[in-house]
Image (tube, grey):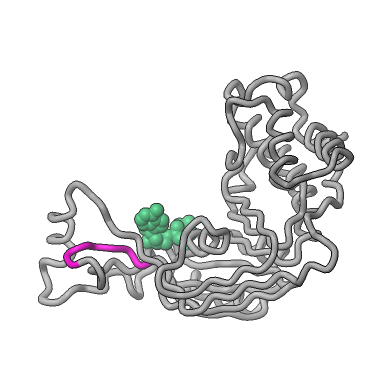
Amino acid sequence: MTGLAPAPAMTDRKPGQPKAFIRLDHLTLDFPIFHGGARSLKKSLFGKVKRPLQLSRGSRTGGEVRMSDNAPGVLEVRAISDLSLTIRSGERVGLVGHNGAGKSTLLRVLGGIYLAQPGMVTVRGSVETLIDTNSGMNPALTGRENIYLLAQHKALRSAQLKQLEQDVEAFAELGEFMDLPLRLYSSGMAIRLGFGLATAIAPQILLMDEWFMAGDARFQDKARARLANVVDGAEILVITSHSLPVLEEWCSRIIWLEGGRVKMDGPASDVLKAYAEAMNAHV
Ligand SMILES: Nc1ncnc2c1ncn2[C@@H]1O[C@H](COP(=O)(O)OP(=O)(O)OP(=O)(O)O)[C@@H](O)[C@H]1O
């Protein structure tokens, strides 16, 4: 079946380009809580104690709910807290942690979607962020026109454009819908195209959320084969997942986050073992 063919080894690397590199220095990221009932929310969260509670610290859900240091009276969720780490070319990194530990937020910071507040983020190399299969696509355009859009964005030459078009068309298997506007696609069809586009060109740094793999069972098999090819072509992989087998298979290093901080960072086998033990102890 044509759709099972892996992605071509197309990369966006230029000759002489330096190796990919990620460094975070003392990164903190707070989300202010803007809510109609913020006053009553504040009362119920903080009213029962004399000084502000660090509500979520040590618990297994969410970041720390706190009063803002900068905006008096404003509540915020501290999703990332004073985080420092370095990821080098060749590393395959998995992020684990409880719900609300900060995994997706960290991925978005690395992808430039969220800006660091205090702290410094250095990301060297081209980045592809596989978080949402719809991102970067224009629903008013046809599938084929969306392929041209990507080619334009990546400044591909015409031979590369042809290769990209053939590859995505074979993968997505959309038939005549390839020449119809995206807004007419079912969600599964849009995922096929979005996934095909997002995994057509291997970046230096690949950031991936586990939700990106969602889809029907047959599509998942195809997607895995294709993804493996793109991961091989990338210098750095950072993936968030709750699936330990997925992390075991894909990652050499695991960073375990808890309340926006690093709880453990090391070889995948060591960290996953400790993490699984901690999870079992909480059941
Ligand atoms: N856009 C946002 N606005 C406000 N708070 C947010 C936002 N995104 C995340 N948060 C908060 O930041 C904290 C970290 O969330 P994040 O989505 O990074 O966690 P996660 O580790 O990816 O969780 P999960 O495993 O449940 O997907 C949570 O407490 C969450 O409530």
Q: Write down the region rendered in magenta.
A: 72-78
* Observer able to see residue 259: no
Q: Residue at x 75, y 45 (%)?
A: 155
Q: Where is residue 41 in the image (x, y as percent from the top left)?
A: 18, 56
Q: Is residue 117 above or below residue 265?
A: above
Asked if residue 255 lies left or right of residue 160, the reply is left
Picture quarter containing residue 2?
A: top right
- In the rendered image, residue 98, in percent from the top left (x then y), is placed at 46, 65
**Can you see residue 151?**
yes
The residue at 57%/67% (across/down) is: 95
Q: Which residue is drawn at 82% across and 36% down?
A: 3
State the image quarter where residue 202 is shown. bottom right
Image vertical order of residue 209 relative to residue 223, above or below: below
Where the N terminus falls, by quadrant?
top right
Asked if residue 192 lies left or right of residue 138, the reply is: right
Query: Nearest the camera: 78 or 124?
Result: 124
Query: Is residue 227 located in the magenta-colored stretch of the structure?
Result: no
Q: In which quarter of the image is ligand 1?
A: bottom left
Nearest the eye: 21 or 207 = 21
The x, y position of residue 199, in whole percent, is 73, 47
Residue 209 sits above or below residue 18 on the image: above
Image quadrant where one finds the C terminus: bottom left
The number of discs equals 0
Q: Residue 97 appears at what percent x and percent y?
A: 50, 67
Residue depicted at x 65% and y 75%: 87
